[in-house]
Image: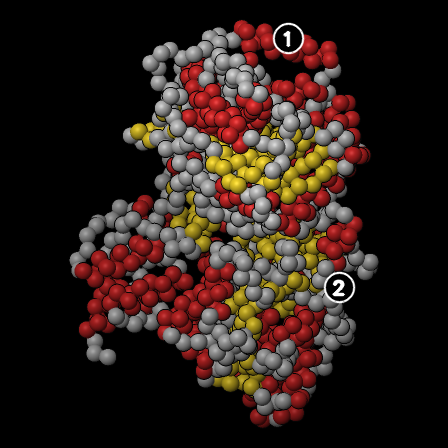
Amino acid sequence: MSDTSERLREQSPAQNALHTRRLEERTAAAPGGITRRPAGTGAPLSFAQQRLWFLDQLGSGNAAYNMPYSLRLSGPVDLDTAVRAFQALVRRHETLRTSYPSVDGEPAQTIAPVDTHVWEPRVVDLRGADDAEEQARQLAAQDARAPFDLGRGPLLRVTLVALTERETVALINLHRIVTDDWSMTVLTDEFCHLYDAFRAGGADPLPPLAVQYADYAHWQREQFTDGAANRGAHGPAHWRKRFSGELPSLRVPTDRTRPTVQTYAGRTRSFTLSAEVTAGLRELGGAANATLFMTLLAGYAALLHRYSGQDDIVVGTTVAGRHRPETEPLVGLLANTLALRTDLAGDPTFRELLARTRQACIADFAHQDVPFARVVEEVQPDRDLSRTPLFQTMLSLHDAPRPMPDPTGLRVSPFGGEGRTTALHDLSLHVVDEGDRLRCAWEFNVDLFADATIERMAAHFERLLLGAVTDADLPLSLLPLLSEPERAELLNRDNLISVEVAPDTCVHHLFEEHVRATPDAVAVVDGEDRVSYRELDRRAGIIAARLRALGVGPESRVGLCAPRCPDSVAALLGVLKAGGAYVPLDPAHPVDRLLHVLSDASVRLLLTRRDVVASVPGLTEGVSVGYLDDWLAEGAVAAQEEPAAVPPVRHAEPNADNLAFLVYTSGSTGRAKGAMLTHGALMSAFRSWERVYGLGRVVRRHLQAANIAFDVFTGDMVRALCSGGTLVLCHREALLDPARLYTLLQRERIDFADLVPVVIRRLSAYVAEQGRMLDNFKVLAVGADIWFMQDYWNLAKLCPPRTRLVNSYGVTESTVDSSLFETPMPERGDEEPVPIGRPLPNTQFYVLDNRLQPVPFGVNGTLYIGGLALARGYVGSPELTAERFLAHPFSKRPGARLYNTGDLARILPTGDVEVLGRVDRQVKLRGFRIELEEVESVLGQHPDAQDAAVIVREDALGERRLAGYVEPRPGRSPDPVALLQYLRTQLPYYMVPSTITLLERIPLNANGKHDRRALPAPAPVADAVERPAGFATATQERVARIWSQALGADVVTPEDDFFQLGGDSLLTLRILFALRRAFGVDLPPITLFAATTVEELARRIDLAASTPA
């Protein structure tokens, strides 16, 4: 036990004597020593019993709190005498005759009288059976799994199994509500003494008990009930202080999704710490005046810190609770639980951590009498049915079992057949001190951890401890965890696959090869418009010639602001042909953002169309403009009048290191940042796609679904046109309407698409609803956001077996895609994310810690990407480039770099990588990368905003959305609707929150930072605006109910606006599906953009319903 007696064992004889004397003085001086409770006084439950009773009620009587153990009795056993000895134990200890029924919903303690209580062990005779030992073990395992009925009892089961004439096994099982580890020793000792006395014909030799367990419970209640004197410095106040502030939950990565309600399915895995480590721990602890338990606790906390990344670790342990002499011979639950909080902040050395741990343990053990249930009451942690309160892991240290007393003619030893199939916590470490070595056992929840993970953890623990005893002045981050073979596997696995990239070839050269080979093949499809390779090349050549005439060449940056159309594709190819680099812009973005990109990228020439300029005032300020519609029209006329007037473009050949394109993504400073991608990076990406997807051989018809300003647009274009395929443009209206999207996919026989999960989810639902299949796909890639296994399986049901379902992962800074996953994992839960798999050829993945060292399999770290597809850096941001693009510590290639993705990831036992979220506050929603700080920064710049916070929340139907919160300036009362309208003028639509909630104060944590976990559920925007209620028609009421469900708004009125309530374009599809089911009308998606109020939409529904088909 890790209690006071353990400390005594570690101290010198003089210290031991002094400590013992003080302990005795404290016990003698304690007010109201434990005595028999007054006659007629009820028998209360102790605090620990009451907590176990509640857990039993919650778990409907499972076997998690069984405490089975077994004894082998070697020698001729008199079974009748053994039965008599056990019965004497039941008469002696009231706890063994106690049940705990529920009375009016409250626990009661019922003690059966000695003279009326009937109980006897079960006797099983296996003498003569060939497999008697195995049968006994099966009986032990079965009994260990059988629950007790606390309300009826008995809570002790004993089975005497006769194996041979000279071998008997006693299978003993008690519920933890009546016992603890100390009690097991008491029972064993007393059984041996009773058996010996009865066998010799004597009487019960045991002295009467001064008190019973119920007397202890009565005393404890008097000591630790509200209002008792212990509320001072030596009582719960200590624990209130220890657990003030934010309480940590252990975040050690698990192999399986945590169940919503804690399960207790467990297993154990034993290992032994070497003599070298054991001796080193004793020496290190002795030098620090720390006990062995303190030293082990420091080591265990360090391991958990390295696994979880947490600086605040809480580990539970138990103390015997027997420092009063009258409690020593009792059978009952006197053990108490302590929650030991360890501070690992600042990357201390192990020696510093040990000093912190020792100091904290001394303070905590001085208050070990406070029942754990009282501590929980005082601290009031958030209750979570999936976890135990305050801590989720335990550490215990025991002495090696002392020899059991042998009755005359018998030898008693452990049988050990019961096994351990439960785990009370996520993970527990039990250590037995055997002198020269420490025997350890992990107890772990099998619904969270795989056996292989625990095996690795054991090896890492010993390696970390060996590092600590070898050099205790190393920071925790430098203590070794990995063996050399494990480290080599982590660094090299899947990172050595390469594909050749010719240094003098660019993607537009590949396109031109297909122009020469198949000039009349269709290159681009846009609705009814079909553009051949010859025609697309002609248009690109016209644009390239004009660009060259204007001085465009290598490193020239040319903006393109145009809608998705064949001419935009030709423009991008024309920029590449001219040797320049293109900067794509979405005309739908706010003009301020467009101007920022043009300025930041040093764009001097902007390609656009006259209709775009007319719709985006101010777009052309400060830049030269080339109008694509004019250039192409003039080129077409010139070609008809004099074909020689449009000569082939003479390339100003860029090299692999020259820029090919720049893509702007969300930035944490409040401004978008531009990633610079080179020709070499783009060629490497294409060659990787070519190999893994079979471009040009397996897949030929590509869907183009991404926004033009998104890097995936370039990926779609290059995959199709550099492999001789056809690029089919999918406009936003079709992308958001599953029916139109499905029609397009089938009509154009699309066999390759790269779509975001939210689009796939809606497409799958539509196809399933219609009873159809997605039967043309050969490769269907899903990426740009987290994709969950439930959606994966739903999609798989709709595709033929030949379809490759791929989860693709990439970042702009590594040229669109970096990895793929397509191996089914049926063992993963529906709510778990689909892994991102393994790196593409020419790409390396590393999951590293803060010191750029590999973390073990299954442990969280930051994902770094290396390889030939990395961007040059960020335009105009050398500091940010240096921060995110680092010298490659594991490569021998000159100039090799790693990119810090900021994604929190881990390597699964299969070798696949799983992304778990963000290290920073960047998120991906519907395929768009969003820095929440950028949205906060813009929102906080509103003149009425004092402070602003933005988080991601799930709406009522499980969709992830942005929610904004504003603390108004004193005296200001901003309208949430106006705040949203302001954001729409400053940010792209996908970065605008669905809701804005006004708060008197945005909550802060102890460090003065936003406490985002304390932010309330978002209020619908309409809640902040007074509007008349009441609906004029039944249709309005039904529409309002549908909106309420989809938007999470409590009330909507006829005048409420769908988009002002927080709706967005993706929600329109859900609304339309619901309207179709409710009214039987099929409205086009554009309807909700035109009829944005309940009143107007209801009018259109009534009109559609009354119009003949």
How are the colours assigned in the image? Answer: secondary structure
Q: Residue 21 bears which disc, if any?
A: 1
| Residue visible at 25% across and 49% down in the picture | 1027
| Residue visible at 53% across and 41% down in the picture | 125
Say which of 683 and 126 sits in front.
Answer: 126
For the C terminus, the image quarter is bottom left
Say which of 587 and 923 sits in front.
Answer: 923
Report the amino acid beneath label 2: Leu
Vertically, is 654 above or below 328?
below
Report the amino acid beneath label 1: Arg
Q: Residue 488 bears which disc, if any?
A: none
Neighbour class for label 2 at 10 Å: few (<14), some, many (≥20)?
few
Vertically, is 845 above or below 605?
above
Q: In this view, does 510 lie to the left or right of 831?
A: right
User: Residue 7, how many percent across, how many down?
Assistant: 66, 20
User: Residue 264, how many percent across, how many down?
Assistant: 50, 42
Secondary element at tag 1: helix
For the N terminus, the image quarter is top right
Q: Which residue is labeled 2 in the image? A: 496
Rounded to the nearest angstrom, the CA distance separating label 2 from label 1 is 67 Å
Q: Can residue 629 be seen in this view?
A: no
Residue 661 occupies which quadrant of the picture?
Answer: bottom right
Vertically, is 518 above or below 1067?
below
| Residue visible at 58% across and 88% down in the picture | 521
